Amino acid sequence: MKHTKILYTIIAALVLLPFIVSAESTSQTFDASDYDRVEVETLHGDISAVAVSGDEISISFEHSLGAGVENEITEALSGLLEIAKTYEGSEDVDINITEDKVNRVLKVSVETIEEGNEEIEDIDISVSLPASIFVKLTSTNGNLSVDGSQAGFDLTTTNGNVAIDNTAGPGAFDATNGNVEIDNHAGDLDGKANNGKITGEIAMPDHNGECILETVNSDIEVSVPVSVGATVSLSNVHGASQITGLDVKTKKEGDKTIKYTGDGSGRIYLVTVNGDLILKGM
């Protein structure tokens, strides 16, 4: 019989709170005052992070199971500490939680392993936390979303879409085989998407801000404030480029012609191969 393995790394003072278990999900809460950063990583599942009021971080796991595994995973999660000790060498699911209160980082990682016909198909993770905490999400074969974070984010996924809603602070993403939708991000943004379209509104700073977006085999269509001051570069190999709604000027720097808006202190850089580039003022 195969079981779930759950491991804890304890740094500084750690209080183990019991998991709340149902047949489909399990969750745990943490004191948000202990952390400035939350990092979550999974294989074969979606991750969502939503900013909420209050002083707690809540992390919930929802699983979709293949034949023959549901009883084992439910039993394992209901006996967190006992299973962690008894089945330390098992191979179905690893849930690792590291409470690093010295560096103020909470880390959660989930790994699923396929064996024969018994497979954990997905373990989706939902995080609710104060808006003042930085979020780092990493998934393979899963979608990522962040909503309301005001301290910045770093999102990485393969074979999944990315949704960014009402965020602020320094933002970064790296998506492969998925589209990226940005609904009102205020701050710098540096993102890459391979085989995926990037769309959205980016309220980069008026001065010394950055909006750097790259994709391959797809389009980029984004809007920035009309008040922004930045150099502007749109580069593609096959496709059209268009700038509308911005007062773009040109100047010579040696042999180069530079496009810019406002005081030119920031940087807007859009790049694609085999796709269109559209930059708009808002």
Image: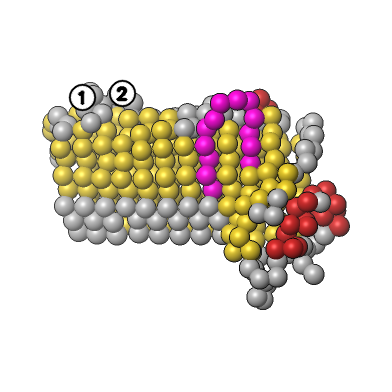
**Toward which corner of the image does residue 194 lie, by quadrant?**
bottom left
Q: Is residue 115 left or right of residue 277?
A: right
What x and y, as percent, mark residue 129?
Answer: 58, 33
Residue 198 showing in the rendered view: yes
What x and y, as percent, mark residue 122?
Answer: 58, 59
Residue 253 showing in the rendered view: no
Q: Are marks 2 and 1 in contact (CB under 8 Å)?
A: yes
Residue at the location (71% across, 37% down)? 99
- Residue 56 drawn in magenta: yes
Residue at the location (56% across, 26% down)? 53
Q: Mark 2 vs mark 1: which is more N-terminal?
A: 2
Q: Residue 127 versus residue 253: which sits nearer the camera?
A: 127
**Toward which corner of the image does residue 262 lie, by quadrant?**
top left
Q: Is residue 82 left or right of residue 221?
A: right
Name the residue type under label 2: His
Q: Which mark is residue 207?
A: 2
Tell me: residue 70, above or below residue 230. Answer: below
The residue at which mark 1 appears reads as 262
Q: CA distance from mark 2 to mark 1?
A: 9 Å
* Circle 2 Cα neighbour tier, 10 Å, few/some/many (<14 / 14–19 / ≥20): some
Q: Quadrant of the N terminus?
A: bottom right
What x and y, as percent, mark residue 184?
Answer: 35, 34
Tell me: residue 231, above or below residue 109. Answer: above
For the record, the magenta segment spans 47-59
What x and y, as percent, mark residue 103?
Answer: 67, 31
Query: Does the magenta stretch mainly form a helix, a strand or a loop?
Result: strand
Q: Quadrant of the C terminus?
A: top left
